[in-house]
Image (spheres, rainbow, N blue to C red):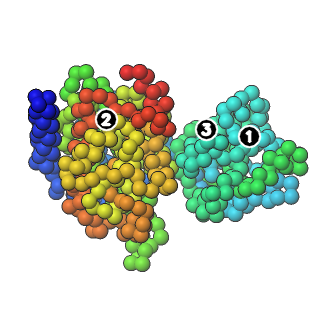
């Protein structure tokens, strides 16, 4: 009897605390400011926040100013509120042709020169398998072209292909190669779709010398090339790559932090993140609108993190809060990857990442948390959402692989529990496709009452985690559990 009374009073006091926290957020939340921020970031003036456009500066300067005015502090080692990233924009060649024995490959058809400088001449080919670090080790590739499969046996997602391509290019360069040709041999990814998408200027992180190496894909669905190399029917290749241009672009992640209040927990950080870039200007829609304003994707998320900065700067939780607005997500998760590779806060001090990204919504009674069910902090997120009268649901379209397609994955791979808190969707249906990467993704077509509830519940979810007694972990058996153990050890 006594025991259950104690249980009841504990339950009541929890309910009371949760109610008080919700009320505080309700009281302090400045909806008008949030909508002003959203309206500015999605305005035509910013031309769709393409990281290669000069208008991108309007976006990052605005976000940095808001974080500063909120009272969030610059992170030591950053350039004020910025983490500078050396991007380069690599154009397709004016001429791109490779002749291999009897076969000819042409740019845009069965060949894509993705990066590097122009190069012409005849070079010997060396098959390096998948091009793993071990495959390159000890090989003398001086003056030769390394030929590998794209990806790795267990890594075939588009993000993996590009990340590994970077690594292989660097290793090929180190062994003296003059170019890297990757054989594209994944039948499940339609080549023509890829070719149309990639036969235009590509943004990447400038890796200095290894970025000069021509990085080439050839279509090789029936794996003819390794046979040809092995039988010496294609011992060497004649390259004609002309008219490549590579332009440097200044990239910026916007980064700030708020110190936690608990002397033991403040060295731990909860990272609140969202990408602020979008796809820029594109094909005009039926109304002639060619500016892709990216309200759902991902100005709503950017403003969510800015709102959290404004709230937590005045009401800091126990743990510290790291605020991160990534650039160039749409170019292949580049900004977040750069941070993961060059962290301004040691990654093992970042105990959780509540990321935001989204294509849109089709249900305003829910919030879709990509990755719900995979960490021990799930209840804290679900309760925050429920406190605002909404319901948190897990990824309804796992076949889309959304978890591994946004910035959160760059941190999950390192072991940091990192779900993505998205606007509510129950399927990738017509309502989502109507706005996803379309010119019509604007503030005018948003349900702002719903978005406001979403914003508030994000703050509460973040606060619950930042105040939790225990550090969240991956659930047992998750694909990133091992990485988590490696990152944090047995603490
Ligand atoms: Zn997005």
Quadrant of res 76: top left
Q: Look at the picture and state if 262 lies above or below 322.
A: above
The structure residue drawn at horizontal position 37% and vertical position 45%, both measured from the top left corner, is 372
Which dot, 3 or 1, sits closer to the camera?
1
Q: Is residue 305 left or right of residue 286?
A: left
Q: Tag 3: Cα neighbours inside 10 Å, few (<14), some, or many (≥20)?
A: some
Q: How far apart are the two marked residues, 3 and 1, measured between alpha carbons?
A: 14 Å
Between 204 and 4, the residue placed more toward the observer is 4
Q: Could you tell me which secondary element the residue under label 3 belongs to?
A: helix
Percent x, y for residue 81? 32, 39
Quickly name the residue at label 2: 270
Residue 167's tag is: 3
Q: Look at the picture and state if 103 lies above or below 256.
A: below
Q: Earlier in the sequence, mark 2 or mark 1?
A: 1
Quickly name the residue at label 1: 129
- Circle 2/circle 3 CB separation < 8 Å: no
Q: Tag 2: Cα neighbours inside 10 Å, few (<14), some, or many (≥20)?
A: many
* Label 1 within 8 A of ligand 1 by Cβ: no
Answer yes or no: is residue 45 visible: no
Percent x, y for residue 127? 78, 41
């Amino acid at each position: 009897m006594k025991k259950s009374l104690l249980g009841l009073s504990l339950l009541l006091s929890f309910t009371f605390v949760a109610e008080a926290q919700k009320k505080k957020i309700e009281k302090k939340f400045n909806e008008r400011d949030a909508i002003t921020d959203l309206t500015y970031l999605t305005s035509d003036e910013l031309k769709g926040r393409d990281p290669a456009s000069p208008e991108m500066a309007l976006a990052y300067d605005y976000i940095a100013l808001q974080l500063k005015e909120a009272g969030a502090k610059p992170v030591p080692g950053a350039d004020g509120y910025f983490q500078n990233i050396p991007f380069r924009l690599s154009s397709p060649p004016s001429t791109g042709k490779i002749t291999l024995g009897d076969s000819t490959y042409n740019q845009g058809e069965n060949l894509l020169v993705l990066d590097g400088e122009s190069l012409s001449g005849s070079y010997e080919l060396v098959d390096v398998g998948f091009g793993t670090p071990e495959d390159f080790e000890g090989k003398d590739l001086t003056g030769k072209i390394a030929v590998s499969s794209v990806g790795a046996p267990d890594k075939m997602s588009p993000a993996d292909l590009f990340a590994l391509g970077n690594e292989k290019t660097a290793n090929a360069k180190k062994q003296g190669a003059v170019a890297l040709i990757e054989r594209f041999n994944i039948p499940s990814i339609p080549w023509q779709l890829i070719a149309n998408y990639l036969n235009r200027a590509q943004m990447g992180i400038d890796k200095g010398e290894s970025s000069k190496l021509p990085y080439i894909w050839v279509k090789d669905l029936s794996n003819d090339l390794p046979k040809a190399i092995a039988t010496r029917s294609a011992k060497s290749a004649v390259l004609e790559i002309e008219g490549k241009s590579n332009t440097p672009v200044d990239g910026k992640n916007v980064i700030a932090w708020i110190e936690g209040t608990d002397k033991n927990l403040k060295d731990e950080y909860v990272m609140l993140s969202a990408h602020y870039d979008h796809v820029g200007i594109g094909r005009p829609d039926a109304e002639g609108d060619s500016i892709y304003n990216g309200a759902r994707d991902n100005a709503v998320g950017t403003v969510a993190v800015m709102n959290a900065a404004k709230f937590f700067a005045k009401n800091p939780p126990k743990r510290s809060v790291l605020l991160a607005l990534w650039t160039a997500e749409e170019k292949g998760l580049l900004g977040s990857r750069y941070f993961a590779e060059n962290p301004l806060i040691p990654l093992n001090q970042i105990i959780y990442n509540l990321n935001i990204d989204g294509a849109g919504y089709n249900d305003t009674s829910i919030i879709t948390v990509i990755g719900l069910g995979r960490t021990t902090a799930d209840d804290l997120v679900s309760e925050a959402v429920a406190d605002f009268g909404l319901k948190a649901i897990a990824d309804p379209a796992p076949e889309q692989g959304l978890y591994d397609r946004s910035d959160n994955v760059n941190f999950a791979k390192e072991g940091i529990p990192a779900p993505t808190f998205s606007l509510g969707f129950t399927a990738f249906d017509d309502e989502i496709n109507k706005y996803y990467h379309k010119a019509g993704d604007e503030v005018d077509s948003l349900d702002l009452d719903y978005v406001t509830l979403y914003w508030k519940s994000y703050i509460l979810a973040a606060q619950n985690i930042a105040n939790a007694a225990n550090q969240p972990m991956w659930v047992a058996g998750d694909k990133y559990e091992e990485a988590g153990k490696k990152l944090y050890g047995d603490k």
